[in-house]
Amino acid sequence: MFYWRTTVETDQDDRPADAVEMAFTGRSAGRGGGAYAGLNLGGHVGDAVADVEANREALAHEVDLARERLVFMNQVHGSDIAEVDAPWDGEAPAVDGIVTRATDLALAVLVADCVPVLLHDVRAGVVGAVHAGRPGMVGGIVGRAVTAMRDLGATSLSATVGPSVCGRCYEVPAAMARAAAQTAPASAARSWTGTPAIDVAAGVVEQLAAADVAVQWVPGCTRESGDLYSYRRDGRTGRFAGVVVRRAVSA
């Protein structure tokens, strides 16, 4: 089920340690079929509703939470951030980043080429999940997410950047590449054939570093890896997820 997974704990001796669990799913096990074969978690891509919900139930089980404690966003390639402290009351908001201080609430971001970013400050007890595609990177979603985390008390932020389409595989018109590079110079890239391209993940990492956020970058290109969904490669396809959960560990 998981492409990558880890747990980070505090190292304080004077109180029970908090922990943050983070993961990126793969597509190796799930109910989806055809173009959505595997663990498709995207409910907006044309897959059977029952299959998507079964996959979400399976993911919730793997992170040891009730299904309603696994929360998704209505992602719109924007730069808005929402705070969440419980399962949504009704439809998920149209945002591309969510942050929380709540424990045992899994924040999920769906991607199939865009950059999933999982943010955490274990000591402060704050976590966040961000969908950073090219429009979000250019629109400043990284900075807004960092500000939202710090508004909740984060003082020592770390980010885990998940797999996404690499610069060599993300060919774009020259004007689009120039516009991205004006916002994040590190995003300037060339495709496998030497044409203008964008490395969105490199731009996101540059923005995180500029905001004094420690970065861990999980390797992998979605277009090149068969264990990840890629819209750029397949067009009609599913979505994998980045998931982050804050745990309060008992003494």
Image (spheres, rainbow, N blue to C red):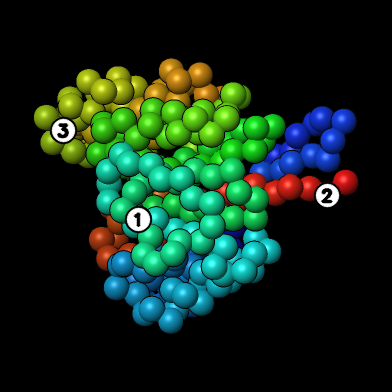
Q: Where is residue 10 in the image (x, y as percent from the top left)?
A: 75, 34
Mark 1 packing: few (<14 Cα in 10 Å), some, or many (20+)?
some
Q: Which of marks 3 and 1 is in front?
A: 1
Q: What element carries label 1?
A: loop
**Above-or-below relation of 23 to 125:** below
Q: What element carries label 3?
A: helix
Q: Which residue is drawn at 54% across and 34% down?
A: 152
Q: Where is residue 56 in the image (x, y as percent from the top left)?
A: 51, 69
Q: Where is residue 208 in the image (x, y as percent from the top left)?
A: 45, 26
Q: Which residue is drawn at 54% across and 57% down?
A: 86
Dots 3, 1 in contact, CB < 8 A:
no
Which residue carries the number 1 mark?
93
Q: Which of marks 3 and 2 is in front?
A: 2
Residue 70 placement: quadrant: bottom right
Inspect the image, locate mark 2, and give the three-letter code of the amino acid beneath it: Ser
Mark 2 packing: few (<14 Cα in 10 Å), some, or many (20+)?
few
Tell me which numbered mark, 2 or 1, is placed earlier along the sequence: 1
Inspect the image, locate mark 1, and give the three-letter code of the amino acid beneath it: Pro
Residue 63 placement: quadrant: bottom right
Tell me which numbered mark, 3 or 1, is placed earlier along the sequence: 1
Inspect the image, locate mark 3, and give the three-letter code of the amino acid beneath it: Met
**Above-or-below relation of 121 to 39:** above
Which residue carries the number 3 mark?
176
Gap between marks 3 and 1 measured at Cα? 28 Å
Dots 3, 2 in contact, CB < 8 A:
no
Q: Which residue is drawn at 87% across and 30% down?
A: 13
Q: Where is residue 53 in the image (x, y as percent from the top left)?
A: 47, 75
Q: What element carries label 2?
A: loop
Which residue carries the number 2 mark?
250
Viewer-nearest residue: 66 or 8:
66
